Amino acid sequence: MSRSLKCISPIDGSVFAERETLSREEAFEAAGKARAAQVAWSERPLQERVDLVIAGVAAVGAMNDEIVPELAKMMGRPVRYGGEFGGFNERASHMAKIAEEALADIRAGEDENFLRYIKRIPHGVVLVVAPWNYPYMTAINTVAPALIAGNTVLLKHATQTLLVGERMANAFHSAGVPQDVFQNVYLDHDTTSELISARAFDFVNFTGSVGGGKAMEKAAAGTFTGVGTELGGKDPGYVMEDADLDAAVDTLIDGAMFNSGQCCCGIERIYVHESLYDAFLEKAVAIVNGYKLGNPLDAETTIGPMANVRFADEVRAQIAEAVEAGAVAHIETFAEDDGGAYLTPQILTNVTHDMRVMREESFGPVVGIMKVSSDEEAIQLMNDSDFGLTASLWTRDIDRAVRVGDRIETGTVFMNRADYLDPGLCWTGCKDTGRGGGLSAIGYHNLTRPKSYHLKKATS
């Protein structure tokens, strides 16, 4: 039995888009078509697959004038920022560029008697479950290399960005990628779990909540299906006494507030050396007070509504609990704050790690700032988290950043920047952030399996 998925626009609470989920039979049929198409797709020359994927990416880019306001209506990001095509294209293009080398055979030696090498073999059928916060960029992280590596792909997108998978599939099909090779599917949670449990997929990539990641792993238990997860974070920034203060404030506050704080690697807690703390706080408050909260379709809006009222309610609850426990809120409520999806961005001080706002993922426009006196104190606080996605270090000393970075439990260490995915580096995490890795050559390794060839030559 199918059910309706509804995208509720955060702009005004109206139903922006609605789609029916696939029935159990239709879902298994889609997975079966993907499996039937996979061998022929993998047998196409690598360069042909690369060219088709890049053509699909370009077709998405041709839709950008329609996509930008559509995203604003679905999840609230202001149109002034121009959508996601820059990062979408950068990531896909990099993965295309490195494909030949990353997927090349690994030679283990050859002599007069033996030839030995390792091939990278596509898993087969890959399920990509993508989130709503950066719906195009997060999806392409896996869709592009999975297809290039010779897998077929089913893309299940978040209800909040219901039309993204549809647009991507239509674009890729228009560029020549066969329909059964890349399918957009509308699935409910139970059907998704049943498909995974039935080994309909050979690899599952999930980006979302910790609870969602656990559900994916539970569904895959005993099937030996690989599951890669990226489950968010509570990413810290650490400003050392020798930091470029203006750059640190500008970047870290933007990293905390951009996209209404709804970034997987957004900055959610900041530790500032005591010598810079007062100046950092003063500048941070001035930046946030300069934001324009409003309708994301308005070109003057710099911070839009959160994607859903329930997300905003969670952030408000964390802020209220922290203030009740002694935290100081530095931003007066904006006139446009409606108590719903439109939420005043907030800076909190006098916070502690006993507060949820400093421990649980907020995924909204709030950041706690704490004063520290040493690297040792900062390291202990940064590691005092269930998550481990990124950490942003601010110093003029690269060696010091490396020493501190080596001790932080995280997937990526930034120095003098934050909140960016470099496709040449592995996107990965630890602890409750999940396991696996996307982008870079390692992304290809996770979307393929090694197959060894040990060939004895005939002697006569």
Image (cartoon, rainbow, N blue to C red):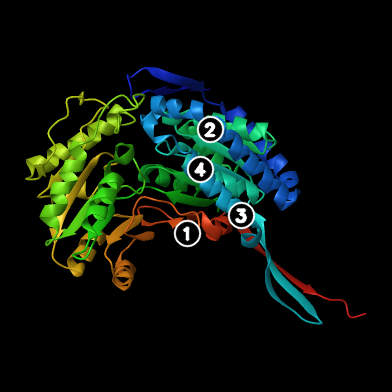
Residue at 40 percent across and 46 percent down: it is 214
Q: Identify which residue is drawn at 13% across, 53% down.
A: 279
Q: Which residue is mark 2?
A: 165
Residue 173 x, y percent position in the rendering: 66, 33
Q: CA distance from mark 3 to mark 4?
A: 14 Å
State yes or no: discs 4 and 2 in contact (Cβ < 8 Å). Answer: no
Pointer 3 local density, CA inside 10 Å: few below 14, some 14–19, many at least 20: few
Q: Amino acid at mark 3?
A: Lys
Give the residue at mark 1.
425
Q: Amino acid at mark 4?
A: Phe
Q: CA distance from mark 2 to mark 3?
A: 24 Å
- Secondary structure state at the residue bearing disc 1: loop
Mark-to-mark CA distance, 4 and 2: 14 Å
Q: Earlier in the sequence, mark 1 or mark 3?
A: 3
Which residue does the image show at 81% across and 82% down from the upper left?
112
Which callout, 3 or 4, points at the residue further toward the start of the chain?
A: 4
Q: CA distance from mark 4 to mark 1?
A: 15 Å
Q: Quadrant of the C terminus?
A: bottom right
Q: Is residue 196 left or right of residue 30?
A: left
Tag 3 residue? 97
Contact? badges 1 and 3 (CB < 8 Å):
no
